Image (cartoon, rainbow, N blue to C red):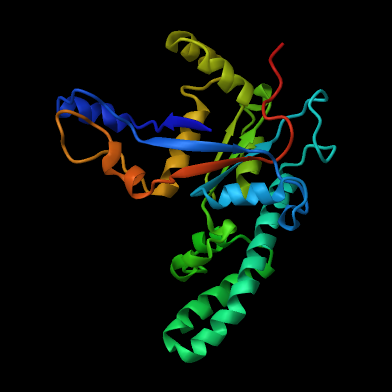
Amino acid sequence: MGVVAVPDDRLDHLGSLYSSERVVPAMATFVDIAGIVRGASEGEGLGNQFLAAIRECDAICQVVRAFHDDDVIHVEGKVDPDGDIATINTELILADLQTVDNRLPKLEKEARRQPALAPVVKAITAARAVLDEGRTISSAVARKELDPTHLAELQLLSAKPFIYVFNVDEGSLDDAELATSLVALVDPAPAVVLSAQLESEVAALDPADAEELLASYGKRSRASSSWSTSGSRPSGSRPSSPPDRRRRGPGPSTAATRHPRRRASSTRTSSGASSRRRS
């Protein structure tokens, strides 16, 4: 589990504007969950633990391997970002289908006695059609094909917001074509392309050296900043609280209090969480 501050340049400006004694950023908690395997929805591998852990989170962050390294074995024997994403999404969809199929027949009977439940039955039936097509609920909601209002009680796994982090070789960071193709795989979900190895090296440096190293790759800031910022959005966090000269930042007055389990689940889609080190 990792707790990180959500970068927001506006906070420093607001802190200066209101002469705040402290600047307190919003915080996001990431829970690292081992990669999923086929059959997880039926209990294969650590499937049940995996799915239970995701159910406790507010968003799913898939860290997808997109680098090549013969020393880091891929569970499927090849690097296939699209296939890895499909494996996880398929297991989430299958788990959701089980949930819907268990609930829908009972709800239909209840709706005969309580007509007010008709909109709920309609929404869940529409959600099942989306799942039958092999699509996640969140993707259908993003395209405004579904209204999630009546689906909340089911706690469907694929209804959670998705964030994708593509882990590439350091030498591929300036490959615009590769980045575009990876992001296109998950559109319209937010996605970040980074090198985990470079990010870990930068994190260990002082600001001046970190800036110099990033500049050598044509970067002005860490890609993980975008990751943590995206991770805070599903929970509805806001950049600042009302003016307070003692403190500037969300602190306990924002979604962190209203959503005590505000966490983003970080799921790795294959073995090997970091790309190879530069020689």
Instruction: Give me the residue at 52% from left, 45% from top.
Output: 190
Q: Is residue 29 visible?
A: yes
In depth, the one of 254 and 218 nearer the eye is 254
Observer-nearest of 274 and 186:
274
> Which percent across, then down, holds residue 113?
48, 91
Q: Where residue 255 sits: x, y (%)?
A: 34, 46
Who's the residue at 47% across and 35% down the image?
228
How many callouts does the rendering have?
0
Q: Image quadrant of residue 84? A: top right
Camera sees residue 187: no
Q: Is residue 132 left or right of residue 194?
A: right
The quadrant holding residue 256 is top left
Check the image and name the residue furthest to the right.
77
75 up-or-down from 129: above or below = above
Between 152 and 130, the residue placed more toward the observer is 152
Q: Is residue 98 above or below residue 269?
A: below
Residue 57 vs 226, above or below: the answer is below
> Which residue: 51% across, 91% down?
112
- Image point (65%, 42%), residue name: 182
- Image coordinates of residue 170 in percent, x first then y, are 65, 22
Residue farthest along the bottom direction in this orientation? 112
Image quarter where the C terminus lies is: top right
